Image (tube, rainbow, N blue to C red):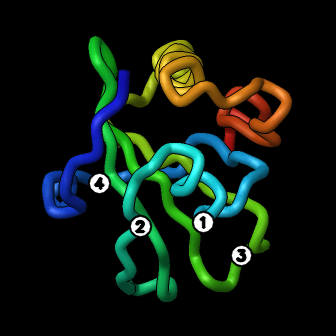
Amino acid sequence: MYHQISLTDLSGTELIPQAIIERSAAVLADYLRIKLDTGHDELDEFEAASLTIDRGPSFMLKHYHGYPIDTTAIYLSHEISKLDQISDAIRLIADALRIPNSSIVWQRADDPDL
Protein backbone atom coordinates (compact mmCIF):
# COMPACT_ATOMS: atom_id res chain seq x y z
CA MET A 1 0.00 0.00 0.00
CA TYR A 2 1.24 3.50 -0.81
CA HIS A 3 0.45 6.89 0.68
CA GLN A 4 1.16 10.33 -0.67
CA ILE A 5 3.23 12.60 1.55
CA SER A 6 4.19 16.23 1.19
CA LEU A 7 7.11 17.14 -1.06
CA THR A 8 8.54 18.97 1.94
CA ASP A 9 8.76 15.66 3.82
CA LEU A 10 11.70 14.80 1.55
CA SER A 11 13.07 18.32 1.09
CA GLY A 12 16.08 17.78 3.37
CA THR A 13 16.94 14.46 1.76
CA GLU A 14 19.40 14.14 -1.11
CA LEU A 15 17.45 12.23 -3.76
CA ILE A 16 18.99 10.31 -6.64
CA PRO A 17 17.17 9.02 -9.74
CA GLN A 18 17.27 5.23 -9.59
CA ALA A 19 14.68 4.13 -12.17
CA ILE A 20 12.67 5.46 -15.09
CA ILE A 21 9.07 4.47 -15.74
CA GLU A 22 7.73 4.69 -19.27
CA ARG A 23 4.61 6.63 -18.28
CA SER A 24 4.01 10.35 -18.09
CA ALA A 25 3.69 11.91 -14.66
CA ALA A 26 0.11 12.91 -15.47
CA VAL A 27 -0.84 9.35 -16.44
CA LEU A 28 0.77 7.96 -13.28
CA ALA A 29 -0.95 10.56 -11.10
CA ASP A 30 -4.30 9.68 -12.62
CA TYR A 31 -3.69 5.94 -12.28
CA LEU A 32 -2.48 6.25 -8.68
CA ARG A 33 -5.01 8.94 -7.73
CA ILE A 34 -2.33 11.25 -6.41
CA LYS A 35 -1.71 14.96 -6.82
CA LEU A 36 1.31 16.28 -8.67
CA ASP A 37 3.00 19.40 -7.34
CA THR A 38 5.07 21.69 -9.50
CA GLY A 39 8.37 23.23 -8.60
CA HIS A 40 11.80 24.10 -9.86
CA ASP A 41 15.36 23.52 -8.81
CA GLU A 42 18.79 24.12 -10.28
CA LEU A 43 18.04 21.74 -13.16
CA ASP A 44 14.62 22.84 -14.45
CA GLU A 45 10.93 23.01 -13.67
CA PHE A 46 9.33 19.73 -12.66
CA GLU A 47 6.18 17.91 -11.64
CA ALA A 48 6.53 15.58 -8.68
CA ALA A 49 4.80 13.60 -5.97
CA SER A 50 6.33 12.15 -2.82
CA LEU A 51 5.09 8.81 -1.60
CA THR A 52 5.81 6.19 0.98
CA ILE A 53 4.98 2.52 0.98
CA ASP A 54 4.25 0.19 3.86
CA ARG A 55 7.42 -1.62 4.95
CA GLY A 56 9.39 0.28 2.36
CA PRO A 57 11.11 3.54 1.51
CA SER A 58 9.78 7.00 0.91
CA PHE A 59 10.44 8.12 -2.65
CA MET A 60 9.62 10.74 -5.23
CA LEU A 61 8.09 10.38 -8.67
CA LYS A 62 9.47 13.26 -10.72
CA HIS A 63 9.39 14.54 -14.26
CA TYR A 64 11.52 17.45 -15.44
CA HIS A 65 9.99 19.56 -18.20
CA GLY A 66 12.97 19.06 -20.51
CA TYR A 67 12.79 15.27 -20.36
CA PRO A 68 10.70 13.03 -22.65
CA ILE A 69 7.02 13.54 -21.80
CA ASP A 70 6.27 9.83 -21.48
CA THR A 71 8.79 9.19 -18.69
CA THR A 72 8.81 9.63 -14.92
CA ALA A 73 11.78 8.93 -12.67
CA ILE A 74 11.77 7.26 -9.27
CA TYR A 75 14.06 9.12 -6.87
CA LEU A 76 15.36 7.45 -3.72
CA SER A 77 17.34 8.74 -0.78
CA HIS A 78 21.11 8.71 -1.26
CA GLU A 79 21.22 6.53 1.86
CA ILE A 80 19.90 3.67 -0.27
CA SER A 81 23.19 3.27 -2.08
CA LYS A 82 24.03 -0.40 -2.52
CA LEU A 83 22.91 -1.89 -5.81
CA ASP A 84 20.94 -4.72 -4.18
CA GLN A 85 19.17 -2.23 -1.86
CA ILE A 86 18.28 -0.01 -4.82
CA SER A 87 16.95 -2.96 -6.85
CA ASP A 88 14.92 -4.22 -3.86
CA ALA A 89 13.46 -0.76 -3.29
CA ILE A 90 12.49 -0.37 -6.96
CA ARG A 91 10.87 -3.82 -6.89
CA LEU A 92 8.89 -2.94 -3.73
CA ILE A 93 7.78 0.37 -5.22
CA ALA A 94 6.75 -1.18 -8.55
CA ASP A 95 4.75 -3.87 -6.70
CA ALA A 96 3.05 -1.36 -4.41
CA LEU A 97 2.14 0.93 -7.31
CA ARG A 98 1.19 -2.03 -9.55
CA ILE A 99 3.60 -0.92 -12.24
CA PRO A 100 4.60 -3.79 -14.54
CA ASN A 101 8.30 -4.54 -14.93
CA SER A 102 7.96 -3.88 -18.66
CA SER A 103 7.19 -0.22 -17.86
CA ILE A 104 10.50 0.23 -16.05
CA VAL A 105 12.74 1.13 -18.97
CA TRP A 106 15.86 1.81 -16.91
CA GLN A 107 17.06 1.20 -13.40
CA ARG A 108 20.39 1.57 -11.63
CA ALA A 109 21.20 -2.14 -12.09
CA ASP A 110 21.27 -1.49 -15.85
CA ASP A 111 24.14 0.96 -15.43
CA PRO A 112 25.60 0.72 -11.91
CA ASP A 113 28.60 2.94 -12.68
CA LEU A 114 26.52 5.91 -13.79
- Label 4: state its secondary structure: loop
Disc nearest the viewer among 4 and 1: 1
Q: Which residue is mark 1?
A: 26
Give the position of the N terminus as an image quadrant. Answer: top left
The residue under label 3 is 67
Report the side of 98 relative to 69 (left or right).
left
In three-dimensional space, the C-alpha distance between marks 4 and 2, rounded to whole angstroms, equals: 20 Å
Label 1: element kind: helix
Note whether 70 is above or below 50 in the view shown: below
Q: Are marks 2 and 3 in contact (CB under 8 Å)?
A: no
Q: Which mark is residue 45?
A: none
Q: Secondary structure at mark 2?
A: loop
From the viewer's perspective, is residue 50 above or below residue 44?
A: above
In the image, residue 40 lies at what x, y percent? 38, 86
- Residue at 78% x, 50% y is 22
* Secondary-structure class at tag 3: loop
Which of 3 and 74 lies nearest the eye of the viewer? 3
Q: Relative to 24, is 37 on the left or the right?
A: left
- Marks 1 and 2: CB-CB under 8 Å? yes
- How far apart marks 1 and 3 lie (CA) works out to 14 Å
Q: Which residue is mark 2?
A: 36
What is the CA distance from the residue labelled 4 to the residue labelled 1? 24 Å
Front tag of 3 and 4? 3
Q: CA distance from mark 2 to mark 3?
A: 16 Å
Looking at the image, how many numbered discs can be counted on the residues? 4
User: Can you give x and y, in whole percent of width and height, for residue 34 in the image?
Assistant: 40, 53
